[in-house]
């Protein structure tokens, strides 16, 4: 049968994911709270998809933050597993950037601050997302473009110096050390943030290519990513981009310097007197 949860009225399908369909739904009752329900057909689940789902549920359960999609509940029946989440009516950041071509630096900076606030909290919880990209970041609404990080399907609980070496996620946003199957750590999320900021500013990712081979070729050329010249972005913004998009993880900005960077300015610290 079709997906169905007793306390909810299902409306239209709002997304198709790698292993799930996402529906808009309303909670029955006096106040019709609107939610997004990720429905996973159990018979479709491979071992690795089930692993991702279990991880996603476990991680979402422990995360509560203004800029992270809130999981309200999860339930199952004989056919489906359902993740009931806060609904983000503004769609995803990928569609938003495409509709605007590029975003003003001030908007990019506000988005970046929101992502940084979420990342800071995730650091405290030892969670790395590992698949940060515009299609996994949602806008609460169009009138209030507050970002929410979602889709924790590939996320991991990752202590600071633990290293991993499996390849998953989307190559365009993936740190070189993952694409090249080297060991990696939590700093891969900072690379992805750099790519996302770049795409918001310039309308496309710094590497674009039609095939995985071409992409790997581009990433292997140890040429630093150039921030396009002639674009009037501030020096703080340019500096942050270049520091996030360092191929060599040891050259890449670390989390503390990222949170304290003048363009991120998480604490809105007053300048020197
Ligand atoms: P997958 O792991 O399969 O990529 P996602 O969690 O990224 O699944 O969801 C797939 C799509 O469904 C998203 O790109 C988005 O368009 C839509 N979607 C997912 N969660 C929400 C939500 N909370 N609010 C609104 N739309 C959502
Ligand atoms: Mg996704």
Image (spheres, grey):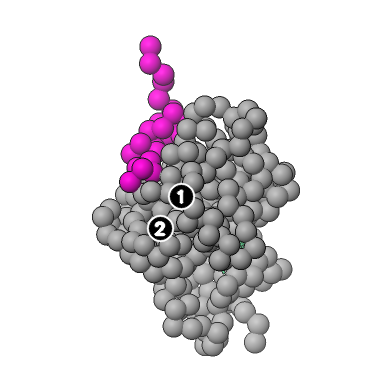
> In the image, is residue 102 above or below residue 60?
above
178 vs 20, nearest the viewer: 178
The secondary structure type at the circle numbered 1 is: loop
Q: Which residue is drawn at the image coordinates 41% and 32% (left, top)? A: 261
Horizontal arrangement in the rendering, residue 170 relative to residue 251 (left or right): right
Q: Is residue 226 visible?
A: yes
Q: Report the magenta residues as a range.
A: 250-273
Q: Which residue is drawn at the image coordinates 52% and 32% (left, top)? A: 237
Q: Residue furthest top?
A: 273
Q: Is mark 2 within 8 Å of ligand 2?
A: no
Horizontal arrangement in the rendering, residue 21 relative to residue 250 (left or right): right
Q: Earlier in the sequence, mark 2 or mark 1?
A: 2
Horizontal arrangement in the rendering, residue 189 relative to residue 232 (left or right): left
Tag in front: 2 or 1: 1
Question: Can you identify the residue that label 1 sits on?
Answer: 222
> In the image, is residue 29 above or below residue 108?
below
Question: Can you identify the residue that label 2 sits on?
Answer: 177
Give the CA distance from mark 2 to mark 1: 12 Å
Residue 2 figure quarter = bottom right
Residue 176 figure quarter = bottom left
**Dot 2: few (<14), some (14–19), or many (≥20) neighbours within 10 Å?**
some
268 vs 161, nearest the viewer: 161
The secondary structure type at the circle numbered 2 is: helix
Q: Which residue is drawn at the image coordinates 38% and 48% (left, top)? A: 248
Query: Residue 150: where, in percent of width, then height?
Result: 52, 58
Query: Residue 137: where, in percent of width, then height?
Result: 56, 54
């Amino acid at each position: 049968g079709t997906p169905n949860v007793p306390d909810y009225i299902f409306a239209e399908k709002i997304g198709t994911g790698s292993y799930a369909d996402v529906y808009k739904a309303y909670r029955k009752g006096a106040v019709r709270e609107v939610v997004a329900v990720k429905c996973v057909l159990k018979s479709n689940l491979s071992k690795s998809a089930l692993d991702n789902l279990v991880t996603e549920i476990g991680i979402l359960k422990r995360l509560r933050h203004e800029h992270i999609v809130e999981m309200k509940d999860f339930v199952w029946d004989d056919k489906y597993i359902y993740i009931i989440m806060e609904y983000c009516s503004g769609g995803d950041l990928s569609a938003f950037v495409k509709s605007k071509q590029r975003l003003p630096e001030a908007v990019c900076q506000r988005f970046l601050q929101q992502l940084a606030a979420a990342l800071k909290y995730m650091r405290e919880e030892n969670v790395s997302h590992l698949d940060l990209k515009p299609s996994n970041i949602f806008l609460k609404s169009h009138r209030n473009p507050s970002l929410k990080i979602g889709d924790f399907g590939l996320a991991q609980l990752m202590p600071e110096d633990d290293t991993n070496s499996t390849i998953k996620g989307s190559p365009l946003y993936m740190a070189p050390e993952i694409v090249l199957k080297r060991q990696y750590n939590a700093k891969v999320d900072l690379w992805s943030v750099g790519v996302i900021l770049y795409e918001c500013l310039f309308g496309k990712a710094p590497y674009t290519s039609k095939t995985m081979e071409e992409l790997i070729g581009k990433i292997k050329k140890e040429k630093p990513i150039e921030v396009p010249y002639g674009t009037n972005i501030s020096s703080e913004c340019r500096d942050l981009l270049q520091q996030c998009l360092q191929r060599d993880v040891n050259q890449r900005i670390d989390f503390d310097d990222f949170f304290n960077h003048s363009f991120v300015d998480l604490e809105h610290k007053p300048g020197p007197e």
